[in-house]
Image (cartoon, rainbow, N blue to C red):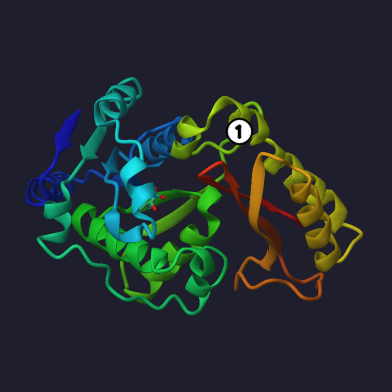
Amino acid sequence: MIVFTNKSEIKDHISKEKAKGITFGFVPTMGALHNGHMSLVKRALQENNVCVVSVFVNPTQFDNLDDLEKYPRTLEEDIKLLETISKDILVYAPTVEDIYEGNTKAGHFSFDGLEFEMEGKFRKGHFDGVGTIVKRLFEIVTPENAYFGEKDFQQLAIVKKLAQKHGIPVNVKGCEIYRESSGLAYSSRNARLKPDYKAAAPFIFQTLLAAKDKFGTKSANEVTKWVEKQFAKNEFLELEYFIIADITTLKTVKRKSKSKTYRAFVAAYADDIRLIDNIALN
Ligand code: PAF
């Protein structure tokens, strides 16, 4: 496996390989790789000759300095884990300097309003940071296909919009949420959960499942109120938001329509660790 830290070197390597007809799938990550990431890498390897995995904790998408500093950085373990899967993986683990060239600032993006919903309301500037890094990475890696987990469903919708609006020739593919046996969605942040909070966290998915069930017969507002009550009774989890949204606009649903597709989204704190999850409702 080749590990690149410099954008010119990886660009040069990829363009030579592309000239031979090699296809590239791309899995962008912030490292601390887990089984959820591995499922994306495996899919990329099935659908392309080579998978590029970027490992970069992107400073411009964090609105909280403490979260940025505490974000796990485990490059050596990440490389070892990837080596167990395949030799046809390239790792791109750049420095902040390699990506931002002395100007560590996000650009400004419009994603047709998707950026103002949910995470956009609670994490100011987050999607400008995501847009900035993903656009740069797409330009460096030039993949045919790129793979994003549905756990970050809003991010996935925004990256699709980014590619479409900026004419970036990549197929952005969403991959199902990969869960621990407890139902907790895999996240690099799970490793930081203290035991009591780790034990409490599967409540998020259990509540989403119950919400899905209730959505069959109750209004979105009734389901939302019910979920808020369940979280209020939980001493380990603090709900930031529960929203039922139309999957195309990500706007909160006021009145259900049979012709629309909905998903329920949660963000909750377990101690100081922010967890997100979501579920398809219909
Ligand atoms: O989902 C993530 O890990 C990050 O937001 C991404 C897409 C790698 C951009 O930094």
Q: From what the image shows, is residue 56 above or below residue 159?
A: above
Q: From what the image shows, is residue 22 above or below residue 216?
A: above
- Residue 173 position, x and y percent, is 46, 53
- Residue 121 position, x and y percent, is 53, 69
Give the side of residue 207 with respect to residue 68, left or right: right
Q: Residue at x 30, y 24 (%)?
A: 77
| Disc 1 within 8 angstroms of ligand 1 (CB) | no
- Residue 257 position, x and y percent, is 80, 73
- Residue 107 position, x and y percent, is 27, 72
Q: Residue at x 17, y 52 (%)?
A: 96
Q: Which residue is mark 1?
A: 197
Quadrant of res 44? top left
Q: From what the image shows, is residue 94 above or below residue 112?
A: above
From the viewer's side, name the closer residue of 16 and 32: 32
Looking at the rendered image, the quarter that the C terminus falls into is: bottom right
From the viewer's side, name the closer residue of 96 and 229: 229
Q: Residue at x 46, y 33 (%)?
A: 192
Quadrant of res 242? bottom right
10 Å crowding of disc 1: few (<14), some (14-19), many (20+): some
Q: Residue at x 13, y 46 (%)?
A: 10
Q: Residue furthest right?
A: 217
Identify the element where label 1 is drawn. Answer: helix
Q: From what the image shows, is residue 108 above or below residue 231?
A: below
Which amino acid type corresponds to the residue marked 1 in the rendered image?
A: Tyr
From the viewer's side, name the closer residue of 22 and 260: 260
Give the side of residue 254 with respect to residue 182, left or right: right
